Amino acid sequence: MKALVYFGARDLRYVDVDTPRPKKGEVLVKPRAVSICGSDLSGFKGTSKFRVPPLIMGHEFSGEIAELGEGVKNLSIGQKVGVVTNLFCGKCPDCKRNLQNICDNRYIIGTTMMAGSYNGAMADFVPVPAEKIVPLPEHVSFAEAALAEPLSISLRAVKHAGNIKGKTTAVFGAGPIGLLAIKCLKMFGAKEIIAIDIIEKRLDMAKKCGATAVINSNDDVLKFTRDLTCGEGLDFVLDAVGIEATINKGIEIVRNGGNIIWIGLSAKQINMEYFTSVCKEINIKSSYMYTTEMNEALDLISSGKIIVKDIITNSYPMSKGPEIFAKLAGNQAEDVKVILTND
């Protein structure tokens, strides 16, 4: 079969590899749409410990069942499916606490975790445990279903904030996760949703996704948010960037006793406004990946409660992967979500 194989920093090749066969309890999926994640780009650049070469990347995808492994029932060849790509163990203390997202024994399709590497969906075929398969209705496109994975991440982060109906909110970062978080905030009834980013094109998209106001990070964000809230500050801030500047600005613009969710992973270490955080009695919580939100995300897409296709800015055949990765790594701002297709 053909696959996009990551051999090292900025070395991605479309090559022939052995076709995998499904083991007992697995199905072989033919990916039809694979979304390029920011973490895939970090891997391509050689800056991610979660992409160890040689590796076939791709963890945001949907496709068709091509082959059934021994013992698989209630699924059929040719069936249109989504895939839960977090392969947790289900036995460790974290899994038993319903924290499957941080299971140390988990594999994630298309990445390298503590348990090892698992080749992903940027290929003609990928084996998947049958219990991770989610049948799709015909009216949901492959591209839409591929975005259920990032939507799951945004959905979990917003749910961490509790009841945000009628609340004033802000999202730092109008990339895919931030834009999908804006859609979730709108669905849950937030009164104000402020999108904050440095790229004007993405702020324009944030408006289309439901932001009630937008502001460039280079402008006076504090004054803007204070004016909007009669000097009080925001009820809830979600940081989908994760750098020192946005984290500290979030602490500044949230109200006393307000809520902050950290989801961005750009920085490893920062100098944080700790004193201010304590004195304002801010509730700070991190959010990582998802647990049960994948099925919920697919239901939201299927029902039309959340539209995801509007953040897809380009689509290319899988064979153009090396060229597209090089382009995105050089100027990621031009695109929000890019889909690789496998017809």
Image: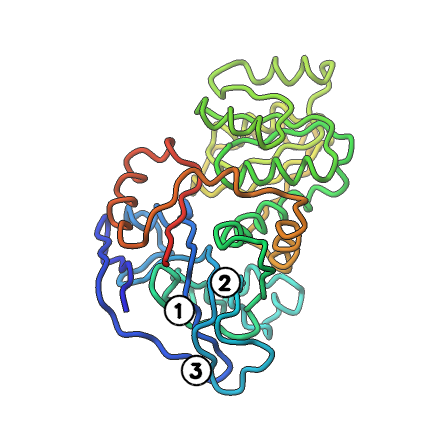
How far apart in space, not on screen, are marks 3 and 1 (Cα)?
Answer: 11 Å
User: In the drawing, does residue 79 fall left or right of residue 330?
Assistant: right
Nearest to the observer: residue 325 or residue 249 = 325
Q: Residue at x 65, y 46 (%)?
A: 304
Q: Which mark is residue 85?
A: 2
How far apart in space, not on screen, are marks 1 and 2 (Cα)?
Answer: 11 Å
User: In the drawing, does residue 335 fall left or right of residue 207?
Assistant: left
Q: Tag 3: residue type? A: Lys
In this rendering, which labeled residue sits more in front, label 1 or label 2?
Answer: 1
Secondary structure beneath label 1: strand
Secondary structure beneath label 3: loop
User: In the drawing, does residue 274 fall left or right of residue 41?
Assistant: right
| 1 or 2: tag closer to the N-terminus | 2
| 2 or 3: tag closer to the N-terminus | 3
Quadrant housing the N terminus? bottom left
Q: Residue at x 61, y 15 (%)?
A: 224
Query: Is residue 103 depicted above or below 37 in this figure?
Result: below
Q: Position of residue 83 (x, y in %)?
A: 52, 63
Nearest to the observer: residue 73 or residue 4 = 73
Q: Which mark is residue 23?
A: 3
Q: Position of residue 76 (x, y in %)?
A: 53, 76
